[in-house]
Amino acid sequence: MANSRSFGGVSAATWDCVKSTSKSQHGTVYAPDGASEGTATTDTVVGTIVLHFEYDGPKDTVTYTIKSKPFLVSPSQIWDGIQDTIDGCN
């Protein structure tokens, strides 16, 4: 499984929803605040997940790259979770 993945259909409103939903449901912190590129950090019971993100508003895409994750968490779990959040926000 790739360490990077792009997701399409992410309008500015969807992107805002993804960030707020991730924060409220999982405690994910996007930094720097309001930036189109940075890190998304989520603390879980098995360890911390750190992703680099790049949001491209004109193309309605966001690309995530796994920087670190607990061994017990697979990339597909991360990608599926992000896709579920995007789907829920659309």
Image: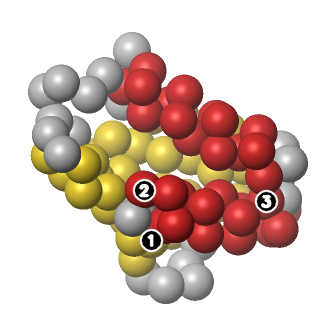
Q: From the viewer's perspective, is residue 31 above or below residue 74?
A: below
Figure quadrant of residue 66: top left
Kindly check if marks 1 and 3 are in contact, taking CB atoms under 8 A apart as contact.
Answer: no
Q: Is residue 86 left or right of residue 76?
A: right
Kindly check if marks 2 and 3 are in contact, taking CB atoms under 8 A apart as contact.
Answer: no
Kind of residue at disc 2: His
Q: Position of residue 20 (x, y in %)?
A: 61, 69
Kind of residue at disc 1: Tyr
Q: Which residue does the image show at 78% across and 52% down from the upper left?
A: 89
Residue position for label 3: 14
Q: Is residue 1 left or right of residue 9?
A: left
Picture disc at residue 5: none
Q: Position of residue 46 (x, y in %)?
A: 15, 40
As drawn, which residue projects farthest toward the bottom?
33
Q: Secondary structure at mark 1?
A: strand
> Looking at the image, is mark 2 or mark 3 earlier in the sequence?
3
Work out whether residue 13 or residue 46 is closer to the camera in this orientation and state it: 46
Residue position for label 1: 30
Kind of residue at disc 3: Thr
Q: Tell me the CA gap for discs 1 and 3.
A: 15 Å
